[in-house]
Image: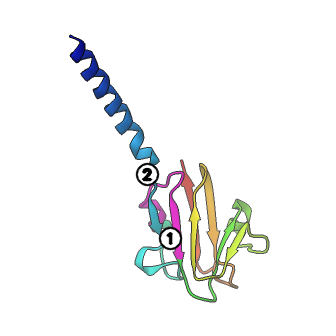
Amino acid sequence: MGGGCTSKAALMFLVLGLAVLPSTLATNYVVGDSAGWNLGVDFVAWVSSKTFNVQDTLHFEFTSPHTVAVVDQSAYLTCDASHPIINDVSGSFTFTLTATGVYSFISAWDGDCNAGLSMQLVVA
């Protein structure tokens, strides 16, 4: 009989461990997929096809003069890059989603955001 308890305990541990496992695996996204962070990409459609979680990463590939600016909600809505949280100009930028909430990204280059180089997503 003792073996049965041990087997049940081991099975319970395995089931609980597997239930926790998916939440600990982060996904690495390339923003815009092969098109990258560029004008002409439908970022609304790109975001809507994904589920974002805490610890996922977003990798932005872009060319000058485009940038990746992490901004607050107000700046996103008005395409105002004058006070970004981060403004990366390197051409290759990785951002980790560290908490639940809304994340907003725009290009700080003149006219890019109004032309559609912007993206907002929610981490649940």
Q: Position of residue 62 (x, y in %)?
A: 55, 82
> Is residue 56 rendered to the left or right of residue 12?
right
> Is residue 72 rendered to the left or right of residue 36?
right
Q: Quadrant of residue 106?
A: bottom right
User: Could you tell me which residue is drawn at 64 percent across and 80 percent down?
Assistant: 67
Q: Residues within 10 Å of mark 2 (few under 14, many from 20)?
A: few
Report which residue position mark 2 lands on: 25
Q: Position of residue 109 (x, y in %)?
A: 68, 84
Vertical placement of residue 8 versus 64, above or below: above
User: Could you tell me which residue is drawn at 49 percent across and 55 percent down?
Assistant: 52
Q: Magenta stretch?
A: 46-60
Mark 1 or mark 2, which is nearer the start of the sequence? 2
Query: Which marked residue is nearer to the observer: mark 2 or mark 1?
Result: 2
Q: As shown in the figure, which amino acid type bears the numbered disc 2?
A: Leu
> Looking at the rendered structure, which numbered label has been put on residue 43?
1
Vertical placement of residue 122 versus 79, above or below: above
Q: As shown in the figure, which amino acid type bears the numbered disc 1?
A: Phe
Going by the picture, which residue comes out furthest to the right?
83
User: Could you tell me which residue is drawn at 57 percent across and 61 percent down?
Assistant: 96
User: Is 107 colored magenta in this rendering?
Assistant: no
Q: Secondary structure at mark 2?
A: loop
